[in-house]
């Protein structure tokens, strides 16, 4: 699974932003046909995304297209407009049942077979952003074509009637529910957008908090957010060095027959080894990182 520390959205009809996005060194580029695109621009967004997939070199950035939600009436035209040009993944917003993922998965599989592409090579990422999505997480998260679940904070707050605050306490339960469902199914967990994009301090704080909660990446909406978010979701040199020491000393202590031991005055045992291994996995070069 490829690394997705930062997923940058832009309206699918905005050619200028799409061409800008490929110069930014961002992990994933998500060309949007859903809420970022005005109702009277849906057809133009489909055409523009198809053109971008055919004509632009995205380099090492992932090419994603977000369709409208299953049941909106637009979803079939959206997916059919972009699939022939082989995006790396399809993002389905506002997922509330596993059947909605299966609907897209079947269409993707027939495109893969028709074009001679490897089956399961086009991945699905989903938005969990409603009360029903949270309630049905257990079943939804088990779909085999899934790579990641993306938590949509603004939509979720609207769905439960919560007032959004800077601290985002009102989202904590749902954010953690998504993280737990992702961890149980070996999926990436992608955190909320910081819509106040000019406030870099707030973005840094919110990104670091998301990483501490267990998210593997974050959604972004503006180029200035790329490096701050990438940094927050990449382990620091100190964290990597400490994780390496844990792995080394753990092996030695096992050989001595000790399950728990002391390192710098702190108790180390199996859960801390697992955490250290996760830190080292996240520190690997982008392409082969698992979560
Ligand atoms: N992706 C790529 N490039 C973007 C971008 C994005 N999401 N947002 C802005 N840019 C580019 C602009 O085109 C501009 O490029 P230029 O310097 O070559 O002219 C540069 O970055 C600076 O943009 P700026 O003037 O600061 O932004 P803005 O005021 O034009 O737009 C937003 C602000 C929030 C409207 C815009 O960033 C945006 O539409 N973001 C995506 C929103 C979205 O997709 N929402 C749905 C998913 S949550
Ligand atoms: Mg949303």
Image (cartoon, rainbow, N blue to C red):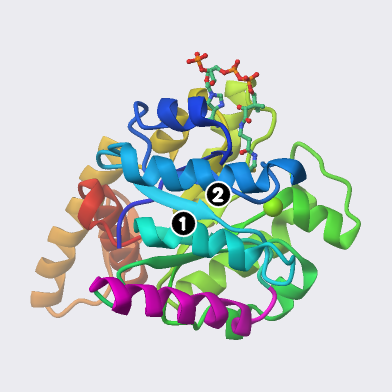
Residue 87, relative to residue 142: is it above or below? above
Q: Give the camera-side residue of 41 and 88.
A: 41
User: Residue 56, image x and y in percent?
Assistant: 32, 36
Question: Looking at the image, do the residues carrying marks 1 and 2 touch, with CB atoms under 8 Å apart?
Answer: yes
Q: Please tell me how crowded label 2 is: few (under 14), some (14-19), or many (20+) other residues with Cα within 10 Å.
A: many
Looking at the rendered structure, which numbered label has been put on residue 46? 2
Q: Give the camera-side residue of 37 and 138.
A: 37
Q: Toward which corner of the image does residue 221 lie, by quadrant?
A: top right
* Residue behind mark 1: 82
Q: Toward which corner of the image does residue 20 lie, by quadrant?
A: top left
Q: Is residue 115 magenta?
A: yes
Q: Give the camera-side residue of 43 and 288.
A: 43
Q: Toward which corner of the image does residue 188 lie, by quadrant?
A: bottom left
Residue under the image location 38 percent in, 49 percent down: 63
Does dot 2 land on a helix, a strand or a loop? helix
Q: Is residue 163 magenta?
A: no
Judge whether residue 168 can be spotted in this image: yes
How far apart are the alpha carbons under marks 1 and 2?
7 Å
């Amino acid at each position: 699974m490829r690394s997705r520390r930062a997923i940058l959205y832009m309206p699918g009809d905005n050619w200028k932003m799409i061409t800008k996005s490929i110069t930014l060194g961002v992990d994933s580029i998500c060309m949007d046909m859903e809420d970022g695109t005005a109702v009277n621009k849906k057809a133009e967004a489909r055409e523009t995304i198809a053109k971008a997939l055919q004509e632009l070199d995205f380099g090492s950035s992932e090419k994603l297209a977000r369709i409208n939600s299953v049941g909106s009436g637009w979803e079939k035209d959206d997916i059919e407009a972009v699939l022939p040009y082989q995006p790396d993944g399809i993002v389905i917003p506002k997922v509330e049942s596993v059947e909605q993922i299966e609907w897209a998965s079947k269409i993707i599989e027939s495109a893969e077979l028709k074009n001679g592409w490897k089956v399961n090579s086009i991945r699905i990422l989903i938005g969990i952003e409603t009360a029903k999505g949270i309630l049905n997480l257990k079943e939804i998260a088990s779909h085999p074509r899934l790579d990641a679940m993306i938590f949509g904070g603004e939509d979720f707050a609207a769905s439960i009637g919560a007032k959004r605050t800077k601290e985002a306490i009102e989202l904590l339960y749902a954010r953690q529910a998504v993280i737990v469902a992702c961890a149980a199914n070996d999926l990436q967990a992608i955190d909320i957008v910081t819509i106040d994009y000019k406030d870099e301090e707030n973005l840094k704080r919110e990104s670091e908090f998301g990483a501490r909660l267990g998210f593997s990446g974050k959604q972004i909406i503006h180029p200035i957010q790329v490096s701050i978010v990438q940094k927050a979701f990449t382990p620091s040199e100190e964290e990597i060095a400490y994780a390496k020491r844990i792995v080394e000393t753990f092996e030695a202590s096992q050989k001595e027959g000790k399950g728990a031991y002391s390192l710098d005055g702190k108790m180390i045992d199996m859960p801390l080894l697992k955490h250290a291994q996760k830190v080292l996995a996240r520190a690997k070069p982008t392409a082969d990182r698992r979560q």
